Image (cartoon, grey):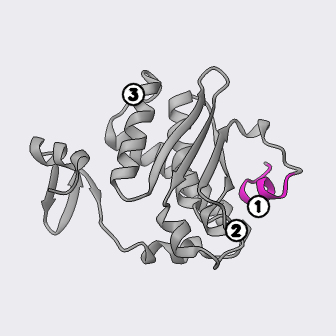
Amino acid sequence: MLNNFYDKFIFTGTLKFTHSNFYLTNIPFLISPIETLTGISSVQDAEFQKKLYLAVKKSTMQGLLPQFNINLGMEKEKETKLIEEFFAFSGWGAIQVIDMQTEAKRAIIVIDNSPFAQALKGKTTLPADTIMRGTLAGLFSAIFKEEIDCVEVECGALSNERCKFIIKPKIEFDFTNASVQQQLSHE
């Protein structure tokens, strides 16, 4: 028994271990120590982090979502619940959508116990959850059916209690804010 979320996939035969690889609904995935990814997140170069964010966002939109064969944007409440459960039960921390304004295409997400923030606490001057930011931007772009961006406004690695993400169209972000400038390209 792994956890209740993954037990459903085991029971239905959609979580498999074949040819030394894990597959969830035929999508390859891995179980990895967090330290293998914190090296990327710990790079103290805002331009590198922007490129990483865009690469993850693009990969989520063009690679991951089509593989899952999910048509996001149809049942937004059910979709956000799936996102919360998937990431929480996959070890990304306790994720919660605390505010979602569908018509305005905005959301606020919080994560308690982010493994990236815990591993990098006191070791970074930039928000630590770049991979999650890119993933959330890709997912919510699909949910809202519009290009959406994400900024981490609070980070556990930077001594905040939890990680907090603002999701909305890029044009709505204040590019005079230093944190926005560090995390998003203005183009």
The amino acid on which the numbered mark 2 sits, given as a three-letter code, is Leu
Q: How dense is the environment of label 3, judged by Cα within 10 Å: few (below 14), some, or many (20 and up)?
A: few
Comparing marks 3 and 1, which lies closer to the viewer?
A: 3
Residue pictured at 39% horizontal, 51% vertical: 88
Q: Circle 3 sits on which residue?
A: 78
**How far across and how far down the image is residue 130, in percent?**
59, 60
Dot 1 or dot 2, earlier in sequence: 2
Marks 3,1: beta carbons within 8 A: no
How far apart are the two marked residues, 3 and 2, measured between alpha carbons?
32 Å
Residue 143 falls left or right of residue 182: left
Q: Is residue 139 above or below residue 24?
A: above
* Boundaries of the magenta span: 177-186
Q: Secondary structure at mark 3?
A: helix
Q: Circle 2 sits on which residue?
A: 126
The amino acid on which the numbered mark 1 sits, given as a three-letter code, is Gln
Residue pictured at 66% horizontal, 67% vertical: 159
Residue pictured at 68% horizontal, 60% vertical: 50
Tell me, yes or no, whether the highlighted magenta stretch contains residue 182: yes
**How far across and how far down the image is residue 146, in percent?**
61, 30
Q: Residue furthest front?
A: 161
* Quadrant location, the N terminus: bottom left
Marks 1,2: beta carbons within 8 A: yes
Q: Circle 1 sits on which residue?
A: 182
Residue 34 falls left or right of residue 55: left
Quarter occupied by residue 32: bottom left
